[in-house]
Amino acid sequence: MNATQLIAKKRDGHALTDDEIAWLIEGYVADRVPDYQMSAFAMAVYLRGMTNEETVALTRSMLNSGTILTWNRERPQRERPPRLKGVRYQLRLEGEWPKRVVDKHSTGGIGDKISLILAPLLATYRMRVPMISGRGLGPTGGTLDKLESIPGFRTDLATDEFQQVCNDVGCVISGATADLVPADRKLYALRDVTATVSCIPLITASVMSKKLAEGLDGLVLDVKHGSGAFMKTEEEARRLAESLVNVGNTLGVKTRALLTDMNQPLGRMIGNAVEVNEAIEVMQGGGPDDLRDLTLALGAEAMVAGGPFGTVFSTSRFIENALNGSNVYDMFRRMVAAQGGDLDALRVVAPASEITSTCSGFIQQIDCEALGYAVIELGGGRKVQADTIDHSVGIEMLVRIGDEVEAGQPVARMFANSRGREEAQAMIERAIVFGDEAVEPPVLIGERIT
Ligand code: URA
């Protein structure tokens, strides 16, 4: 085989075999295939697409480029799980061995702090949740950046410590280690500078190789569409979800996806410390309805995907109890402590100022992407890789699409230090679009793809 012939075959619209794809990826990771040939290959895939079989083969080859986590599925001797306060079905849960290994992946959005709540929620139901997360990407915030607003919290656990925390506590959230999917690290950096990121087969292989390397039984995907999402239309999101779900199921991990709306921020808070605070509110039985509803919907899907739970409907009904008790927050506390964080230490939030409406009318649209960029302007995200983050800044949204507002009414609250104040305020004002017509709010949770 030679790389030039394979690139030409793809360029001319022919499907590559599993062996050809494996040869290319192995060669790339071993530096036998240079960046310039891999760039040409990525562009050929971008322009020609891939069949489902090719996408599966690409994901498998990337997955096999590094370590794949394995979990002890033996029932420990005389294991007695702790009693869960206020949780019914205790007897049934005590009988559930081996502990299932499950996770959630979101394609990214504004105000999306669900991972912080979902990992401990699932662990409360005796699942293991080894969540490898990322940093902010473009306007969307990153789970690791949010967690680092907790003093002491470490997001750079080595693989053995990552597994240890997951086994001891039930959940762990940390960054990818160097030994997991090295093919993706190399290829993603190349795609970033060759305009080949937004390509469904390449996104699928990138996302799924990293998730499958966690050694999962079940996976739920939150595939977002709208002004704050990677995929702007529902149709694009559906095609991505179908591709992700097909690859997961073909490679032996029960995978399902929900298509969800990202035309307005999830919850009220956007930023880092403010999002951690809002996630804690939900874990303590409060918080905004949309955030609770989507957390429960994704939690039920993950539990059904990982088994042995029955239907999504019955599962979501009984996990709702957990958010109303103290178990999820206790579990989060244990995870934070195991990763070196101190939840009782002060998480600084920058001084607040209100942004008021200049006219009366209905909220027609919210440009979520612009709100994400406003947080970056305040210092809450990165413009270039080397930027340091100000965890204390952010935005609180006080209105949602369809709300009627009076002139002078506060529509948002900005938490800002001196960096980028004026620019960010102007961006927030422009992002909220008013009109005379009443509009229907978008439906948050759409189709399920299994
Ligand atoms: N996130 C990833 O991990 N990979 C992609 O290709 C796009 C988004």
Image (spheres, rainbow, N blue to C red):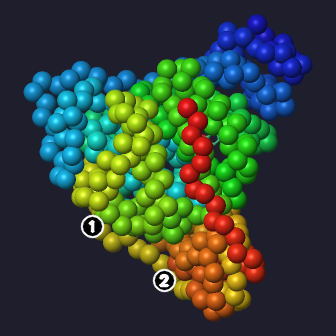
Residue farthest toward the bottom in the current orientation of the protein: 408
Q: Is residue 128 above or below residue 147?
A: above
* x then y, percent, for residue 189: 67, 39
Q: CA distance from mark 1 to mark 2?
A: 20 Å
* x then y, percent, for residue 68: 45, 24
Residue plotted at (73% across, 42% down): 236
Residue plotted at (39% across, 53% down): 117
Q: Write down which quadrant ligand 1 falls in.
A: top right
- Give the quadrant of residue 158: top left
Residue 71 relative to residue 134: left or right? left
In the image, what residue type sits under mark 1? Asp
Q: Looking at the figure, which quarter contains the C terminus?
A: top right
Q: Is residue 247 above or below residue 129?
A: above
Can residue 273 be seen here? Answer: no
In the image, what residue type sits under mark 2? Pro
Mark before the other along the chain sequence, 1 or 2: 1
Report helix, strand or loop for mark 2: loop
Residue plotted at (24% across, 29% down): 96
- Bin the neighbour count of mark 1 within 10 Å (Cα to Cα): few under 14, some 14-19, many 20 and up: few
* x then y, percent, for residue 229: 66, 53
Residue plotted at (35% across, 49% down): 317
- Give the quadrant of residue 17: top right
Between residues 56 and 304, which one lies in front from this camera angle?
304
Between residues 274 and 90, which one lies in front from this camera angle?
90
Can residue 312 be seen here? Answer: yes
* x then y, percent, for residue 270: 54, 67
Q: Could you say which disc has been placed on residue 351 in the image?
A: 2
Q: Could you say which disc has been placed on residue 344 in the image?
A: 1
- Bin the neighbour count of mark 2 within 10 Å (Cα to Cα): few under 14, some 14-19, many 20 and up: some
Between residues 10 and 33, which one lies in front from this camera angle?
10
